Image (spheres, helix red, strand yellow):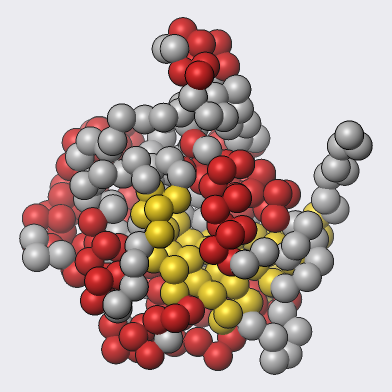
Amino acid sequence: MTERRPTKVRVGALKVPGATLHHEVRGEGPVLLLIPGGSADAGLYEALAEDLADAWTVLTYDPRCFSRSRLDSPVTDQRVEDHSDDAYRLIEAVCPDGERACVFGTSASAVVALDLLSRHPERLERVVAHEPPVVETLPDAAVARALFAEVRAAFRRDGAEAAAATMSAGIGDPEPPKSPGNAEVAGRTEPPKSAEAARRTGAQDAPEAAGPPPLDPGALRRMHANFPVFVEHVLCPFTGYVPDTAALTAVADRLVPAVGEESGRQLTARPVRVLAERLGREAVAFPGGHIGVVERPAAFAATLREVLGG
């Protein structure tokens, strides 16, 4: 079997109001925008983008306050609507006039994807929102709101490790894991697990245990450097976002609410189930948990390909 050659990456910088966005484009075909969540940047999606570039023009980028993108002024609390406008302008720049793009977002970036669909449905073919933490949809929203405020307070008092521990404790336990993973999404800061570590924990029989491939070290460094900005200026504003259910109901056939098959009753998984029910949709199970895109990248890509119809 002939190995597939790495896809050529076209790198650009798009000026938008208040920022310049680093973005990367791979492949040919209909446009698929992958929005990175948490403190991640375009590096989160390198494997996924490479996998899908045979069928789509895959567009990834660093959000305006992270990594290689640059703000025109010092960072302040971020607005979902500004990030949504950035995504829209990227689609406008890359997608031919009149054609619709597909969008995938996970965690905080799924919140951006929901806002994008509610305000610019004319430019979108399908939107996959994987575990958006829109906790205001929950009956116990006040509890969740207090948790994220405490995560930020813990960061201010004691630093990133304390913030991550507070977040993990408050979100709750997932289903028993089926495979090892590595990433930093929605404030998770675990280092990559090596193949040797997987063997020591007996995970070698799990799907993709030999590989989720480790993220590029440079990308990991950038994401760790983004974490303070995420906790201080993104976490609370984004989790406080209230979806426009009336606007989303009108285009619900274009929305794929997605939940990790191992997420169980975690706080990060509950809101999308509630939102799906309100919109008359069924949440689609994706491999792995909240960070399934890096826990089980090949299976995750296959499921995304299926729901996008490619």
Residue 194 visible? The answer is: yes
Where residue 60 appears, x then y in whole percent?
64, 60
**91 horizontally vs 201: left or right:** right
Q: Who's the residue at 75% across and 62% down the image?
A: 55
Residue 154 visible? The answer is: no
Q: Who's the residue at 54% across and 75% down the image?
A: 126
**226 horizontally vs 156: left or right:** right
Q: Who's the residue at 66% across and 44% down the image?
A: 47
**Res 97 → quadrant:** bottom right
Where residue 151 appears, x then y in whole percent?
22, 45
Q: Is residue 38 above or below residue 242?
A: above
Q: Nearer the viewer, residue 28 or 87?
A: 28
Q: Quadrant of the N terminus?
A: top right
Q: Nearer the viewer, residue 297 or 35?
A: 297
Where residue 94 appears, x then y in whole percent?
73, 76
Q: Who's the residue at 36% across and 30% down the image?
A: 177
**295 horizontally vs 102: left or right:** left
The number of numbered discs placed on residues in the rendered structure image is 0
Q: Nearer the viewer, residue 105 or 219?
A: 105
Q: Nearer the viewer, residue 157 or 46?
A: 46
Where residue 249 appears, x then y in whole percent?
34, 85
Q: Is residue 52 above or below residue 275?
A: above
Q: Is residue 178 above or below residue 8?
A: above
